[in-house]
Amino acid sequence: MIRVGVIGYGTIGRIHSEAWREIPGCELAVVADVDGDRRAQAQHDLGVDTASSLHEMLQSCEVDLVDICVPTYLHEELILGAVQADKHIFCEKPLARTLVEGRRLVEISKTYSKKIGIGHVVRFTPAYKKMHQSVLAGEIGQVGVVRTFRGGAPFPAGWNDWFADYELSGGVILDLAIHDLDFLRWLFGDVKRVYAKSTRGRTSARLEHALIVLRFKNGVMAHVEGNWSNVPGEFYTKLELAGKDGLIRFDSRETDPIVAKTQNRAEIGAVAVNPYRLELEDMLEAIRQDRAPAVSATDACGSLEIALAAMESARTGQVIEL
């Protein structure tokens, strides 16, 4: 039985905590959060022990795996703390806030005896995983152009409004568009050059849009859009892959639910596969099988580098060569 401690009980921390409770072979042992109200909420929701910090968690409760679900700018500090305690580590994307931090964590991971996995969840989303398989199988031939979109929902809420602080969150590119940057890198490999434009500085912090143009080393061109809106709306994603022999098109607003009937209940309902649970299950299997997690620190640092290059291009107006 692998005992898990979650740090951070915000939106992602709650999603992870619920998923851990459903996964066989592990136990959600403790949730840590600096906010007393959130600790109380975790006790109410989950019936688990709580702590106010990583240090208190490790002092008061025995855990095998630390799951880090805190704001981006705190990732390095808590990963280092968990490394010092010799724990397996799962951390939400992105790996870190800066490339210096990311590369430092990669170097540490190379000689670390325990597993470090990073939560790039789109790789586990069934529709995206299927599209990945289809392209690699050559079903649409050589891909030439890709277009993605992610966003449309109200501006994200967070502890101390950290999303609205660009220095802490990295804005819409580092927090949101990085999902598609990572997926495309997983699909097409390394990026050669990056050019981006953003509304940062032209609108409020709660209304940011970015367009990123990528040229991959294999010649594929990609247009990646990320959008943070401050008005009520529907979060959605789109992806279009144009190949020599065909086109793959996905729009989350148009997908049909999976209809299922159970043996003991005569009802029909939508069945959703939880990609967060899938990525956490992969982490557990990596520990049990003594293999690398699906997304390593090295892998995540590659996607972080692209996102930071896009941020620099949007700031300077220049093409960034990688």
Image (cartoon, rainbow, N blue to C red):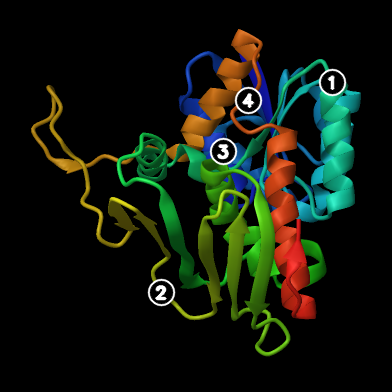
Identity, as a three-letter code, of the amino acid under mark 4: Pro
Name the residue beneath numbered marker 2: 233
At horizontal 32% and vertical 41% (from top left) the residue drawn is 272
- The mark nearer the N terminus, 4 or 1, is 1
**Closest to the observer, 3 or 311:** 311
Per the image, label 2 sits on a secondary structure element best described as loop
Q: Quadrant of the N terminus?
A: top right
Q: Residue at x 68, y 55 (%)?
A: 192
| Relative vertical location of residue 127 with respect to residue 111 in this rendering, above or below | below
For the residues bearing labels 4 and 1, Cβ distance under 8 angstroms = no
- Pick whichever of labels 2 and 3 is earlier in the sequence: 3
Q: Secondary structure at mark 3?
A: helix
Mark pair 2, 1: CA separation? 43 Å
Mark found first going from the N terminus, 2 or 1: 1
Looking at the image, is mark 3 or mark 4 earlier in the sequence?
Answer: 3
Q: Is residue 45 left or right of residue 59?
A: left
* Mark 4 closeness class: few <14, some 14–19, many ≥20 residues within 10 Å: many
**Res 137 seen here:** yes
> Residue at the bottom extreme?
202
Which three-letter amino acid code belongs to the residue tagged 2?
Gly
**Badge nearest the viewer, 3 or 4:** 4
84 or 240, which is in the foreground? 240
Residue sitting at x 32%, y 56%: 250
Q: CA distance from mark 4 to mark 1?
A: 14 Å
Q: In the rendered image, which residue does mark 3 sit on?
A: 16
Nearer the observer: mark 2 or 1; the answer is 1
Marks 3 & 4, CB-CB < 8 Å contact: no
Q: Badge 3 local density, few (<14 within 10 Å), some, or many (20+)?
A: many
Identify residue for label 1: 112
> x, y percentage for residue 22?
46, 26
Report which residue position mark 4 lands on. Answer: 293
